[in-house]
Image (cartoon, rainbow, N blue to C red):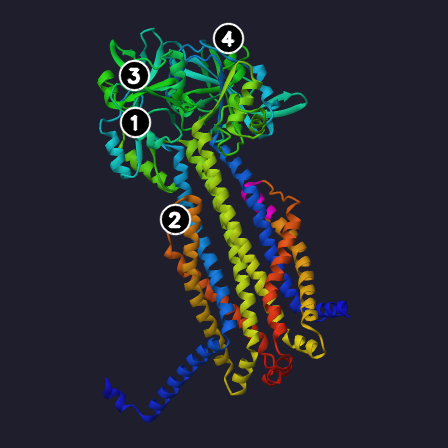
């Protein structure tokens, strides 16, 4: 009889049930989408923050002093220590290699641009543009197109394997050269693939493939410094500790957290005779920006959960309020308060489960759409969220119905049946 | 003009009176309807208030968060740099010109560079700057102790170890003139600054005769404001190069755009859900009053009058709900601002018209929708309780 009551109620009052069901579905969908976005926003914004460029720099351990003003190196570039290019792919083998978005080596060389007496002193920087590297069975590409996303090129990016270069825009204006022209650099004829604009020192420089810079310098395999762009975790008390003074347990926890310090430590381990350090301008600020945006989205998610809980409650209350006559009839026929409430709660439970499942699916699609349209990447939903969402849907539906059910049950059946509700 | 009133015909007076009673009756019905069903009216109003509050808070946040985030982004330092053109110096009053162009809240830091030698013959880049300004602009500089007295220098980490200063007094020479210095503290940035020595601008100019060649500026505001600021700088300093620091400008634009879009999508979803809540509650409320509707019709009220009555009721609900909700929403936004950004979100009263219009529109829709359904039903059927 109980099952039949519930079944008939769904069959005969389909439209009303549909209204409540739609409200639950929408509420759950919004809640799911917002939870998914809020849990994933940290990772997404972290990736966006990589547009500020590298946050780590690796230099030789016994580095000599740079004497450089405005991108012009005033010291013979063959001085000092170098890193070995062959060690670079090892960065791929560090513990946090999944967090390393990219890296680019740099080798500045002092060169003369032009012929004869009119030759200018300039700096040529060798680097990777978009170089294919191998580590074990792993093939990957890296270079300045990843670590320096604000570099803009008019013309084409040079090929890493050829003798073509990028000319900084200020230097290009001085030399009156355009993309496609050739320039003479220290006795070599080089093709200008494109004009580079960075808003920094590179505007006065020539940027070339690393192998070209090495052969001009006469030091094959030499690298002066490496810029590494890594996804890091915001700083906390543990991050700033000195690994040498840690207990083994704390050390493991520190080593296995993607702090900028622990990634620097691992880079130092991977590349012999190197010193890795955070670039404080980038590394120190991204933590605050990240935590602000995460905090904001968390609070907004609470607002969304609150709004959808209210919407579900309101819909349920309305649906039950309209059915006082039924309650009157049931009670007149001898049903107790518990029996009546049980019927309503069962209906609410069914609605919550149905609405919860459809809402979860709709919310996942919504989150996916938000991810694709804003961040150009998918927002994935943890399967753990599903039972939580379902539980929240049931609880909210029950809570929303409870007050209305209590009122409906208390109502005198005589008044309800006489239509004096 | 009482003479005009006296001259008017009795019909006019009757018409005016009849109209007066209508209005009074109309108001009475509105007030009594709310007073008699306090519970239902209150729950409808509550839904309205909550929806308006959430909408207000989201709109306020959406507008203000960008400004809040921009101040966070200014911690990344300068976004515009003014440099002397090749072989020229910046005008002597360049710094004051920059400040008068962009306003006093702009942070501009002068830098001047020379290569000096240590007694052992090592070359090192020495930078003259204004320490007070540099400290404000470059929050990320890790400085053990800022120089206070003249003759004190800030020494980069790498410069310190390469020159073997070891916190002892040292001398630097430039074109035959020597300057005795004492390291006040060490500087660590992870970038080029680490291999340089910083001294006070006045002492620097006195020693070398070189005036600032670079001014780094943090221009506050949106991308357009920065763009405008740069144009003004170009006309104020025609002999200098004014350039955006693209790394900072584009990084900021990128993160800000993404955050704004996410916030916009969330705000849209939340406002939609809140409107749904209002819709559900109000439809229930109006349905619940179908007996009033039937009685009014049975007593001879025209369709228009009944519609006007329910619409007016909904409009009042919308206005009251919007006003209360707006106040609460501003409070919520301010609270979120304080919790997350440690600075309250400034109330935007310009948001109010939108909240008001939205609330009234949703209320009207949810009142008119059920009436359209009820219109098909004969009053007699409703009154019979079927």
Q: CA distance from mark 2 to mark 4?
A: 60 Å
Identify the subunit bearing mark 1: B
Q: CA distance from mark 1 to mark 4?
A: 42 Å
Tell me the crowding category of disc 3: few under 14, some 14 to 19, or many 20 or more residues within 10 angstroms, Cα based: some
Image-quadrant location for residue A68: top left
**Main SS type for the magenta part?**
helix
Same chain? Circles 1 and 4: no
Identify the subunit bearing mark 2: B
Q: Quadrant of the N terminus of chain B?
A: bottom left
Can residue A74 be seen here? The reply is yes
Which residue is at 44% across, 77% downward? Answer: B31
Q: CA distance from mark 3 to mark 4?
A: 40 Å
Of marks 3 and 2, which one's residue comes earlier in the chain? 3
Q: Nearest the camera: A187 or B78?
A: B78
Is B369 in the magenta? no
Q: CA distance from mark 3 to mark 2?
A: 44 Å
- Residue B182: mark: 3
Q: Nearest the camera: B315 or A312?
A: A312
Frontmost of labels 3 and 2 is: 3
Marks counted in the figure total 4
Can residue A322 be seen here? The reply is no
Frontmost of labels 2 and 4 is: 2
In this picture, residue A145 sits left or right of residue B242: right
Q: CA distance from mark 1 to mark 3?
A: 16 Å
Same chain? Circles 1 and 3: yes
- Residue B131: mark: 1
Residue position for label 4: A218
Query: What is the secondary structure assignment of the residue under circle 4?
Result: loop
Residues shaded magenta? A367-376
Of marks 2 and 1, which one's residue comes earlier in the chain? 1
- Residue B344: mark: 2
Of marks 1 and 3, which one's residue comes earlier in the chain? 1
């Amino acid at each position: 009889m109980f099952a039949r009551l519930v079944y008939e109620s769904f069959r005969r009052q389909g439209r009303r049930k549909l209204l409540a069901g739609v409200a639950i579905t929408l509420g759950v969908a919004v809640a799911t989408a917002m939870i998914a976005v809020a849990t994933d926003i940290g990772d997404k914004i972290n990736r966006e923050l990589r547009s500020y460029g590298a946050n780590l720099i690796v230099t030789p351990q016994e580095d000599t002093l740079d004497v450089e003003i405005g991108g012009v190196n005033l010291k013979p570039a063959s001085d000092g220590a170098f890193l070995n290019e062959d060690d670079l792919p090892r960065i791929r083998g560090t513990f946090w290699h999944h967090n390393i978005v990219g890296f680019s080596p740099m080798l500045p060389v002092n060169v003369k641009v032009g012929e004869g007496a009119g030759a200018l002193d300039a700096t040529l920087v060798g680097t990777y543009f978009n170089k294919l590297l191998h580590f074990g069975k792993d093939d990957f590409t890296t270079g300045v197109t990843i670590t320096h996303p604000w570099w803009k090129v008019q013309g084409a990016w040079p090929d890493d394997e050829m003798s073509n270069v990028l000319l900084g825009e200020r230097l290009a204006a001085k030399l009156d050269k355009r993309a496609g022209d050739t320039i003479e650099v220290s006795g070599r004829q080089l093709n200008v693939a494109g004009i580079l604009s960075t808003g920094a020192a590179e505007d006065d420089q020539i940027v070339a493939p690393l192998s070209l810079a090495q052969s001009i310098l006469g030091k094959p395999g030499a690298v002066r410094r490496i810029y590494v762009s890594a996804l890091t975790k915001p700083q906390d008390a543990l991050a700033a500790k000195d690994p040498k003074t840690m207990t083994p347990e704390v050390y493991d926890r520190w080593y296995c957290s993607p702090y900028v310090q622990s990634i620097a430590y691992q880079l130092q381990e991977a590349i012999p005779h190197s010193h890795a350090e955070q670039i404080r301008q980038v590394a120190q600020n991204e933590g605050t920006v990240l935590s602000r945006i995460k905090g904001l989205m968390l609070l907004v998610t609470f607002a969304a959960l609150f709004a959808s809980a209210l919407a579900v409650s309101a819909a349920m209350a309305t649906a039950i309020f309209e059915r006082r006559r039924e309650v009157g009839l049931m009670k007149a026929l001898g049903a107790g308060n518990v029996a009546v409430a049980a019927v309503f709660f069962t209906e609410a439970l069914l609605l919550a489960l149905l609405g919860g499942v459809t809402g979860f699916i709709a919310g996942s699609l919504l989150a996916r759409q938000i991810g694709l349209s804003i961040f150009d990447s998918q927002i994935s939903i943890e399967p753990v969220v599903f039972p939580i969402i379902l539980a929240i849907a049931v609880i909210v539906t029950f809570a929303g119905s409870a007050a209305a059910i209590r009122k409906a049950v208390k109502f005198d059946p005589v008044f309800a049946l006489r239509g004096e509700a | 003009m009482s003479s005009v009133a006296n001259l008017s015909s009795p019909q006019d007076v009757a018409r005016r009176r009849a109209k007066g009673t209508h209005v009074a009756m109309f108001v009475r019905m509105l007030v009594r309807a709310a007073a008699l069903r306090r519970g239902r009216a209150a729950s409808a109003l509550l839904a309205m208030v909550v929806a308006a509050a959430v909408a207000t808070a989201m709109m306020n946040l959406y507008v203000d968060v960008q400004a809040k985030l921009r101040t966070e982004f200014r911690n990344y330092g300068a976004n515009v740099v003014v440099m002397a053109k090749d072989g020229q110096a910046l005008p002597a009053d360049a710094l004051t010109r920059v400040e008068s162009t962009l306003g006093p809240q702009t942070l501009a830091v002068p830098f001047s560079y020379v290569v000096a030698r240590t007694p052992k013959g090592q070359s090192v880049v020495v930078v003259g700057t204004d320490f007070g300004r540099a400290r404000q602009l470059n929050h990320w500089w890790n400085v053990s102790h800022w120089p206070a007295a003249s003759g004190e220098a800030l020494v980069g980490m790498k410069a310190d170890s390469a020159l073997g200063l070891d916190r002892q007094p040292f001398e630097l020479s430039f074109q035959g003139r020597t300057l005795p210095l004492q390291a006040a503290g060490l500087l660590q940035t992870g970038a080029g600054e680490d291999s340089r020595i910083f001294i006070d601008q006045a002492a620097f100019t006195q020693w070398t005769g070189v005036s600032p060649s670079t001014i780094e500026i943090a221009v506050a505001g949106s991308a357009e404001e920065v763009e405008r600021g740069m144009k003004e700088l170009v006309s104020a300093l025609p002999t200098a190069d004014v350039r955006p620091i693209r790394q900072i400008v584009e990084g900021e634009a990128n993160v800000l755009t993404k955050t704004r879009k996410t916030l916009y999508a969330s705000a849209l979803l939340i406002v939609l859900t809140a409107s749904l809540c209002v819709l559900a509650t109000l439809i229930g409320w109006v349905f619940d009053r179908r007996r009033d509707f039937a009685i009014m019709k049975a007593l001879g009220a025209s369709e228009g009058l009944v519609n006007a009555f329910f619409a007016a009721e909904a409009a009042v609900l919308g206005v009251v709900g919007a006003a209360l909700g707006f106040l609460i929403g501003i409070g919520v936004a301010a609270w979120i601002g304080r919790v997350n950004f440690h600075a309250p979100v400034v109330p935007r009263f310009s948001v109010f018209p939108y909240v008001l219009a939205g609330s009234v529109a949703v209320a009207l829709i949810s009142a008119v929708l059920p009436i359209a359904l009820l219109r098909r039903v004969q009053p007699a059927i409703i009154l019979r309780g079927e």
